[in-house]
Image (tube, helix red, strand yellow):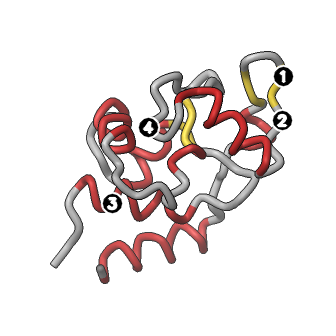
């Protein structure tokens, strides 16, 4: 049985390393979800406070003011505790964007296909 879009979104989110982020768009691509907005909806509806959905930001490196577990301030605090530093209201995506290596990508896809 393969995961639906929501399950794929949550699985990829659970794999984002500490100190790194994904954008909604990059998460949608990795999880094969047709829309970054759908990813945002799933993350906003996430019932699990242990899922590191705070590691997902918009394409400008800005946080979500509607972050499900305490709003934008809570998201920024969690990212700061991960070592992600903001420059004003943004973080440097060149520095903090998680870009899995080809072998990591293959491993992620294999694991998604096995679940």
Picture disc at residue 68: 4
Question: Closer to the camera: disc 3 or disc 2?
Answer: 2
User: Quick check: 27 above or below 4?
Assistant: above
Q: How many C-alpha atoms fall within 10 Å of the one at disc 1: few (<14), some, or many (≥20)?
A: few
User: Quick check: 94 above or below 103?
Assistant: above
Mark toward the start of the polypeptide (1 vs 4): 4
Q: Quadrant of residue 86?
A: top right
Secondary element at image label 1: strand
Residues at marks 1 and 4 touching, judged by CB atoms closer than 8 Å: no
Mark toward the start of the polypeptide (4 vs 3): 3
Between the residue at mark 1 and the residue at mark 3, the CA separation in whole angstroms equals 31 Å
Q: How many C-alpha atoms fall within 10 Å of the one at disc 4: few (<14), some, or many (≥20)?
A: some
Secondary element at image label 4: loop
> Horizontal and vertical percent for residue 109?
41, 71
Q: In this view, does 51 lie to the left or right of 39?
A: right
Query: Could you say which is closer to the camera, residue 9 or residue 68?
Result: 68
Residues at marks 1 and 2 touching, judged by CB atoms closer than 8 Å: yes
Between the residue at mark 4 and the residue at mark 3, the CA separation in whole angstroms equals 19 Å
For disc 3, the marked residue is 8
Query: Could you say which is closer to the camera, residue 89 or residue 3?
Result: 89
The residue located at (43%, 37%) in the rendering is 68
The residue located at (33%, 30%) in the rendering is 37
């Amino acid at each position: 049985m393969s995961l639906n879009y929501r399950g794929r979104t949550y699985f990829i989110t659970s794999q984002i390393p500490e100190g790194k982020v994904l954008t909604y768009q990059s998460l949608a691509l990795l999880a094969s979800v047709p829309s970054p907005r759908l990813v945002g909806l799933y993350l906003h509806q996430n019932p699990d406070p242990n899922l590191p959905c705070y590691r997902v930001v918009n394409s400008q490196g800005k946080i979500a003011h509607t972050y499900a577990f305490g709003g934008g301030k809570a998201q920024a605090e969690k990212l700061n505790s991960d070592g992600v530093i903001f420059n004003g209201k943004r973080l440097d995506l060149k520095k903090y964007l998680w870009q899995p290596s080809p072998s990591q990508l293959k491993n992620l896809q294999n694991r998604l296909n096995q679940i």
